[in-house]
Image: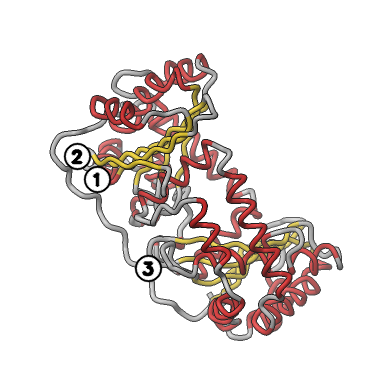
Amino acid sequence: MTDHRITELDSGVRIVTEGMPSVRSVSLGYWIGTGSRGETDAQAGLSHLIEHLLFKGSSRYQSLEIDQIFDGMGAELNAGTGKETTSVYSRVIDEHLDLAFDVMSDMVFRPAFEDVDSEREVILEEIAMYEDDPQDKVFDVLGQAVFGDHPLGRSIIGSADVVAGTPVDAIKAFHDSRYVASNVVLAAAGAVDHDQLVELAATRVPNGGRSADAPQPLPAPAQHAPRVRFERKDTEQYHVCLGGTGIARDDERRFALRVLDTIFGGTSSSRLFQEVREKRGLAYAVYSFTGQFADTGQIGLYVGTRSDNLAPALEVVAQELERLRREPATADELARAKENLKGRVVLSLESTGSRMNRLGSALLSDVPLLSVDEVVEQIDAVSLDAVAQLAEELFAPEQLSTAGIGPDEDVFRAALGPLSSTAVEA
């Protein structure tokens, strides 16, 4: 039995809620199916720019007024842009839900697009800040290596030229084509009454006839030979990522992949963390990661280390990649990873924000909304064979691209050794 309720308005806006009787707060979020994946080169960064501009005023609320309203409620208001989604979300006490929802709805559906030039400058500073952070930037370098010229390989934050030069009319047109009712989910968790929220939505969000569908993003690119990409930067450390394509978000093997990631580099007792950091002291930050998209995914690992430790650290990484395919999990590792995941799932559900995120992202992505018991059952059902098959399929050396940022490309390439034996130049 599920604890959530779903209603679809005539316009196509979907509303999903989950009540939590023991709390007084509500986490409320608009989820829109637009992100960097749905942009052309000439639009690169518009999803993120629009996310910023939503806060610069709407048809009925000035920018300062929005800040004052949420400050006056002691509430939180924020937003985020991803590869495939944009979200605008808040957390308020229940008595302020009506006002928070009214303001957020006006921001999302009726932005004023005022002070655009000043916000361009803010984002250009954000881009500059991001370019100065190699620990973040290396993930985009890896994306370029894995996905090539496909939009999935492009930075979410976008191009400085696009942000600086796109006319306001084009920005408005992009918003109007993506922020359509059929491309929007409203999610809420906490002290919320589903029927009351539906009544509010009927007066605040577009609810006429069904709107035109938003443009569909390009299909996932075909898998290609792995690449090596490097960007030179005067840094104290070399920042290195290895990765390849993963699995889609609705793939039934996603629970097995979470278990595998936990064993490999997802916790402080994981193989990568123990072997690279704890036993040898070769890095401060080292971990594995996964990401899922509509029709593909990404897997990988990150390590940051000084020049003297680069070759030894990558040698250990290579050994652990080989070990992962030869011996993907012991019985103890499998059991510990499962308990870790189940504990994290249950603990996260004590947060109204985590529950709201889960509802909104799942419904927008058409992924089944599983109950906690169903998620636990799926984790418990993961077998050693399932983990082994994924390790062999996804972490084969001939499928892994490599990305690096650091002061000397020759030093970087010399340290790669067997990691890049099958990679092509990029």
Q: Residue at x 46, y 51 (%)?
A: 371
Nearest to the eye among marks 3 and 2: give it.
2
Q: Residue at x 68, y 75 (%)?
A: 329
Residue 129 left/right relative to 234? left
Regarding mark 1 in the picture, which secondary structure is present there? Answer: helix
Nearest to the eye among marks 1 and 3: give it.
1
N-terminal of the pair, mark 1 or mark 3, is 1
Tell me the tag on residue 220: 3
Mark 2 vs 1: CB contact within 8 A: yes
Spatial CA distance of label 2 from label 1 is 7 Å
Which quarter of the figure has residue 151? bottom left
Q: Residues within 10 Å of mark 1 (few under 14, many from 20)?
A: many
Q: Mark 1 points at which residue?
A: 182
Q: Which residue is drawn at 41% across and 44% down?
A: 360
Which amino acid is tagged 2? Ser
Residue 394 left/right relative to 416? left
- Residue 40 % position (x, y): 33, 56
N-terminal of the pair, mark 3 or mark 2, is 2
- Residue 139 % position (x, y): 58, 59
Q: Mark 2 points at which residue?
A: 11
Which amino acid is tagged 3? Ala
Which quarter of the figure has residue 54? top left
- Residue 170 % position (x, y): 27, 41
Spatial CA distance of label 1 from label 3 is 22 Å
Spatial CA distance of label 3 from label 2 is 29 Å
